[in-house]
Amino acid sequence: VIEVETPVEPVAAPAVARETVPAPATERPKIEVPRPAARPRQAAAVVEEAAPVEEKPARVAAPPPRFALQLLRAGDCALLVELPTGEPFQSRDPAYILLKDLLRAAGLPDSPQLLGEPVRWPLLVRGNLDQGPQAALEFVQSFVAARLEEQPSTCLWLVGLPAIRFAGEGDEHSYNRELQIDGLGACWALPGLELLMEEPARKRELWQAMQRVRQRWLA
């Protein structure tokens, strides 16, 4: 018996459902968009309307005062005397004769000694040097203080308005009064010699003040 082998057809394997794995999504490149840098927060500026500025008139410098003073010494007193004519005293000048009378009445020598040259202001006719009232005061006070340091005095007579103003820092209301000035000591303010000659009635008040003040140099 001949066995005929029947060809066996291969059995197809059951189809396995292939699971579709989704392909990984391709990431889109991120584009960095530059952002504007954060600005610091500034306080709101308050704009104020500028107030109208008043235009001040230009400051005009005071003109330099004009005077001439002579420093003298009589006994224990120094005298800063206004020169009425601007020139040194002459022996026959009415103003000088009146000054000698005042010294005799005060119990002082009637032939005063000159202490330096007269002080004339302004110092310079031209130039940019400050020669106003304040500069004149500082100059006169420093000049007199230097002389008094060399020869101290019991009392400094200030005869005439320029002497009172630029050495004693006073005015016409200081006539016949005693003043105490730093660097100069005790002072006595008198009307000018020319004023006393023009207004003789002032001599009475001067004489009354002298009776009180003269105790300074007679003591």
Image: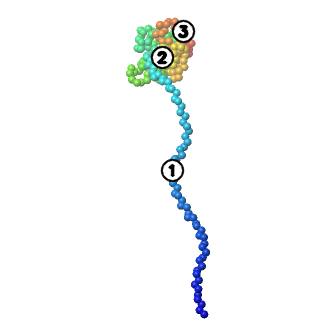
Q: Which mark is residue 205?
A: 3
Estimate the spatial distance between the alpha carbons at disc 2 and disc 3, rounded to whole Å.
19 Å
Q: Considering the numbered disc 2 on the image, is that residue within a helix, a strand or a loop?
A: helix
Quadrant (top left/top right/bottom left/bottom right) for the N terminus:
bottom right
Q: Earlier in the sequence, mark 1 or mark 3?
A: 1
Percent of width and height locating residue 73: 47, 17
The amino acid sitting under disc 3 is: Glu
Residue extending farthest to the left is 126
Circle 1: residue type: Pro
Question: Which of the two labelled residues, at mark 2 and mark 3, occupies the earlier sequence position?
Answer: 2
User: Which secondary structure, mark 3?
Assistant: helix
**215 vs 165, nearest the viewer:** 165
Q: Residues within 10 Å of mark 3 (few under 14, many from 20)?
A: few
Which residue is under mark 2? 163
Q: At 54% across and 19% down in the image, what residue appears?
A: 180
According to the picture, the residue beneath numbered tag 1 turns out to be 34
State the CA–CA distance, disc 2 to disc 1: 85 Å
